[in-house]
Image: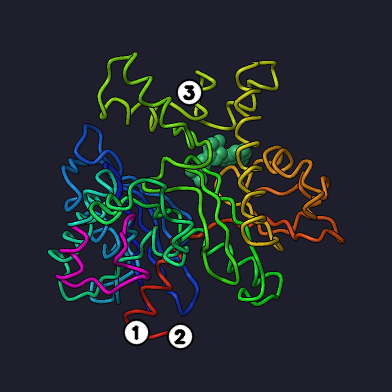
């Protein structure tokens, strides 16, 4: 079964082409700078050989034409005809209250997704462009949408509601939706698989720590709470997003700085978080390097980042009545020894005891990093949202294998 996984951003398209039965990635790559000067496609073959195509990639449709062209090209491709693609799976950020799981894309689904543009104005439009392009270029091939929000559909109402007038929830759908769901689902299931436990018997907390970051409480296989909310702004401190902040501070800043909602959104989404605190960088590696040289604000940013995660872990353990497994993933969670150590410090009372020697050696690989007798199993599980999308796509189009 050959499945093309597509993740369209505002000016980029990432793709992976799977042969699922053989567990192979036949090719992968990225189109970047769509609609800008210097746009290109970087394609990587199964052998690891990379090829660069520069060109005028004016929009997402042309970007997808490039991808389909290279996949089926004689010189660099891995299929002799586009008919060999059995299905296309798309990452779609917002599925609103409508979609509790991945779906086959029909005209009706597209119409519903178009309605959700209001909820995710930055993310859903490029996701839709990818869907339109595939429909125009290879109309016979079935497409599936896999939502970032869907996994969190199981959150109970007391976890997803904001304490604002109930009418606003009804009128505008103002509630917490949560994001990164495909990642939380993948790593929690994979962690249980590695431990040899049934997901429906354990309480898991997953920390997806990348440029965007969120934590998730997964009780007996279902998401019961997560730190991102109506938008991905809520919760943990991120590369450039503030995470939790008092609304009173937001309106105060808007008054004092004489800025409107658009500028405020840019301030809290793009100029805050690690970048805002340090004034240097949103990249955790650069911040760590500066902190090691004595930069006080970088040191502060690291402490704030770790502390916020720790608070969420405590809250979720309380919310679930305990925790059995704690999983780190995302660029920082998978690679940063010091973040994992900083977050787990002083959590012994919860039963979290990491083995610092093991932790020290783990970067980007599946490992248990807790001590032998630790009540809570602490793990590193690299995320793989693309694989999850490919599997969902196969299951929906061809039935569960
Ligand atoms: P992501 O959004 O998941 O790609 O993660 C990006 C974040 O991961 C950035 O803050 C990077 O600094 C961080 N990161 C990536 N690789 C490493 C590494 N080897 N050590 C520490 N942090 C890393």
- From what the image shows, is residue 371 above or below residue 303? below
**Residue shown at the point (26%, 41%) measured from the top left:** 54
Between label 3 and label 2, give the one nearer the viewer: 3
Q: Helix or strand or loop: what does disc 2 sit on?
A: loop
- From what the image shows, is residue 235 above or below residue 93? above
The Cα atoms of the two marked residues, 3 and 2, are separated by 47 Å
Residue 238, position as x, y percentages in the image? 50, 36
Choose top left, top right, bottom left or bottom right for residue 19: bottom left
Determine crowd level at label 1: few under 14, some 14-19, many 20+ residues with C-alpha closer than 10 A.
few
Q: Helix or strand or loop: what does disc 3 sit on?
A: helix
Which segment is the magenta one?
93-114
Question: Is 78 left, or right, of 326 in this rendering?
Answer: left
Among numbered discs 3 and 2, the one appearing first in the sequence: 3
Q: Name the residue under label 1.
A: 398
Residue 329, position as x, y percentages in the image? 59, 52
**Magenta span has 111?**
yes
Q: Residue furthest right?
A: 373
Q: Name the residue under label 3.
A: 276
The Cα atoms of the two marked residues, 1 and 3, are separated by 47 Å
The Cα atoms of the two marked residues, 2 and 1, are separated by 8 Å
Question: Is 358 left, or right, of 7 in this rendering?
Answer: right
Residue 346, position as x, y percentages in the image? 79, 42
Counting every numbered tag in the picture gives 3
Question: Is 76 left, or right, of 336 in this rendering?
Answer: left
Are discs 2 and 1 less than 8 Å apart at CB?
Answer: yes
Q: Mark 2 points at which residue?
A: 401
Among numbered discs 1 and 3, the one appearing first in the sequence: 3
Whereabouts is ligand 1, in terms of quadrant? top right
Residue 149, position as x, y percentages in the image? 39, 59
């Amino acid at each position: 079964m050959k499945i093309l996984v597509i993740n369209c951003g505002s000016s980029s398209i990432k793709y992976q082409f799977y042969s699922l039965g053989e567990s192979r990635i036949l090719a992968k790559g990225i189109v970047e700078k769509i609609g800008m000067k210097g746009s290109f496609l970087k394609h990587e073959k199964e052998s690891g050989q990379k090829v660069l195509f520069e060109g005028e990639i004016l929009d997402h449709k042309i970007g997808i034409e490039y991808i389909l062209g290279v996949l089926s090209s004689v010189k660099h491709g891995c299929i002799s005809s586009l008919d060999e693609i059995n299905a296309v799976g798309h990452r779609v950020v917002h599925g609103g209250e409508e979609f509790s799981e991945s779906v086959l894309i029909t005209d009706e689904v597209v119409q519903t997704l178009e309605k959700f543009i209001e909820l995710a104005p930055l993310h859903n439009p490029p996701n839709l462009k990818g869907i339109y392009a595939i429909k125009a270029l290879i109309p016979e091939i079935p497409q599936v949408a896999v939502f970032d929000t869907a996994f969190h559909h199981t959150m109970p109402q007391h976890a997803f509601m904001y304490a604002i007038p109930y009418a606003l929830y009804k009128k505008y759908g103002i509630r917490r939706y949560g994001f990164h769901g495909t990642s939380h689902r993948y790593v929690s299931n994979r962690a249980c698989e590695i431990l040899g436990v049934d997901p429906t018997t354990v309480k898991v907390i997953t920390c997806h720590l990348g440029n965007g970051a969120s934590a998730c409480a997964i009780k007996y296989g279902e998401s019961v709470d997560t730190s991102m909310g109506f938008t991905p702004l809520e919760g943990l401190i991120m590369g450039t997003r503030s995470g939790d902040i008092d609304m009173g501070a937001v309106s105060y800043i808007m008054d004092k700085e004489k800025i409107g909602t658009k500028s405020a959104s840019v301030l809290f989404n793009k100029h805050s978080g690690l970048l805002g605190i340090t004034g240097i960088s949103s990249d955790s590696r650069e911040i760590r390097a500066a902190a090691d040289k004595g930069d006080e604000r970088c040191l502060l940013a690291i402490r704030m980042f770790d502390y916020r995660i720790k608070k969420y872990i405590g809250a979720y353990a309380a919310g679930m009545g305990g925790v059995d497994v704690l999983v780190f993933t995302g660029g920082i969670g998978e690679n940063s020894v010091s973040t994992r150590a900083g977050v787990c410090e002083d959590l012994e009372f919860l039963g979290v005891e990491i083995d610092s020697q093991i932790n020290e050696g783990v970067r980007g690989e599946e490992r248990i990093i807790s001590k032998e007798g630790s009540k809570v199993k602490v793990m590193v599980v690299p995320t793989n949202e693309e694989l999850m999308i490919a599997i969902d796509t196969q299951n929906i189009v061809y039935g569960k294998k």
